[in-house]
Image (cartoon, grey):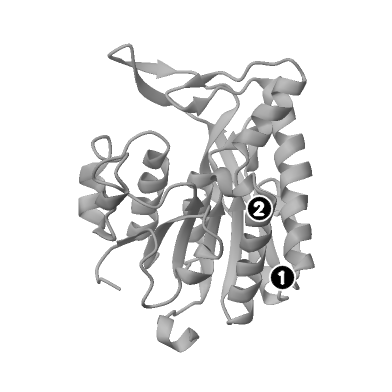
Amino acid sequence: MLDKLGFKSKRIVIKYGGNAMLDDDLKTSVADDIVQLKKMGLKPIIVHGGGPAVSNQMDKEGLEPEFVNGQRKTDQETLDIAEMVLSGKVNKELVGLINECGGNAVGISGKDGTLVKSRKTKKEMKVDGQMKQVDLGRVGEVYKVDVTLVETLMENDFITVISPICAGDDKGDFNVNADVLAGELASSLRADSLIYLTNVDGIREKKDDENTRLKKVHITQAESLIGKKIVGGMIPKVESAVKALKNGVKTVRIIDGTKKHSLLQAFKKSSDYGTVIYADKEE
C-alpha cells in the first residue's frame, strides 16, 4: 500500500485537535490509526491542541476564557493552566493511548531540546469594523525551529507527540497556535505531508453545506479564499498550509477527525476524505 501512496521522505506531520480530542472512542481510533501508519512504514509526528480542555480547567478554577476573533487571550495565569493541561495532561494521555495501541510514543513540548523558539505575536485584527493591533498576551509566533530532537527520536523509531508550549525570546514561555506550529515543523522536517485532523470535513464553498466541500484545492485558489470562503478557525490552518507548501511540503490534507479511522482512510489513493491542498502537481 505504501508504494502506491507515492511518498518520498515518508514523514507526515499530523495536527490533532477539535472535537476528535473530546470523545474517548475517537481518541482511541486516532491513536490506533497513528500506529497503523507507523506500521505501514510512515513516520508520523503529532502536534496537538487542546483548547476545550484548557477552557474546562479554567472554568473549574473560576476563570473566564477571553477570545478576540476566535483567538484566546493568554495572560500568565492562563499560560500556566495551558501548560499544565496541554503538556501535562493532554500530551501524556495521547502518548499513553498510542502506546496502548502498540506504538512507541514519547511526549515533549516545543520547549524541549530547544525545538522551537517563539516571540510575542503581533496580531492585527478587524474589531468593530476597524483594523486594530490586538495584544493577545502570552501567545507566540515561531521564529526558529531546531528539529534535532525530533530527528533523533525518529531515528530511534519513536512517535513524537508535541505540545504547543514553546520557549520565548524574553526568558518566558508562549502558547503557540498548534495549527501554525504543525506547519512550521512540517516545513523544517521537510515532511511529505501535513494533515490537519479537526472537527470539519474540509474547506467548503458554503460553511453550513457539506455538499459544497472542495475535494482538491490548488495553493493559489486556497490563498484567494482566505477571509472569504475560509473564515474563523480554518484561517490559521490554511495560512499555515500555504506556507508549508511554499516551503516544500508536498500536500496538505484537512480531514474530519470525528469520523472513526478517517486518518487512516485519508491515505488511500481512492480516498474521498476532506480537502487536499497541493502546490505544483495534483496528487
Out of 187 and 144, give the one closest to the viewer.
187
Residue 149, visible in the rendered structure: no
* Figure check: 126 above or below 145: above
Q: How many marks?
A: 2
In the rendered image, residue 254, in percent from the top left (x then y), is placed at: 41, 55
Q: Is residue 159 left or right of residue 281?
A: right
Identify the secondary structure beneath mark 1: loop
Q: Which residue is mark 1?
A: 158
Q: Amino acid at mark 2?
A: Ile
**Dot 2 corresponds to which residue?**
162
The image quarter in which residue 128 lies: top left
Mark 2–mark 1 Cα distance, whole angstroms, equals: 12 Å
Front residue of 67 and 110? 67
- Where residue 158 sits: x, y (%)? 72, 70
Residue at image coords 75%, 70%: 104
Q: Is residue 165 visible?
A: yes
In the rendered image, residue 40, in percent from the top left (x then y), is placed at 58, 82
CB under 8 Å between callouts 2 and 1? no
In the shown orientation, is residue 68 left or right of residue 245? right
Q: Residue at x 74, y 55 (%)?
A: 107
Of residues 85 and 112, the one drawn nearer to the viewer in this rendering = 85
Quarter holding residue 105: bottom right
Residue type, numbered disc 1: Phe
Residue 125's label in the rendered image is: none
Instruction: Label 2: state its secondary structure.
Output: strand
Considering depth in this image, is 128 or 19 the residue closer to the camera?
A: 19
Q: Quadrant of the C terminus?
A: bottom left
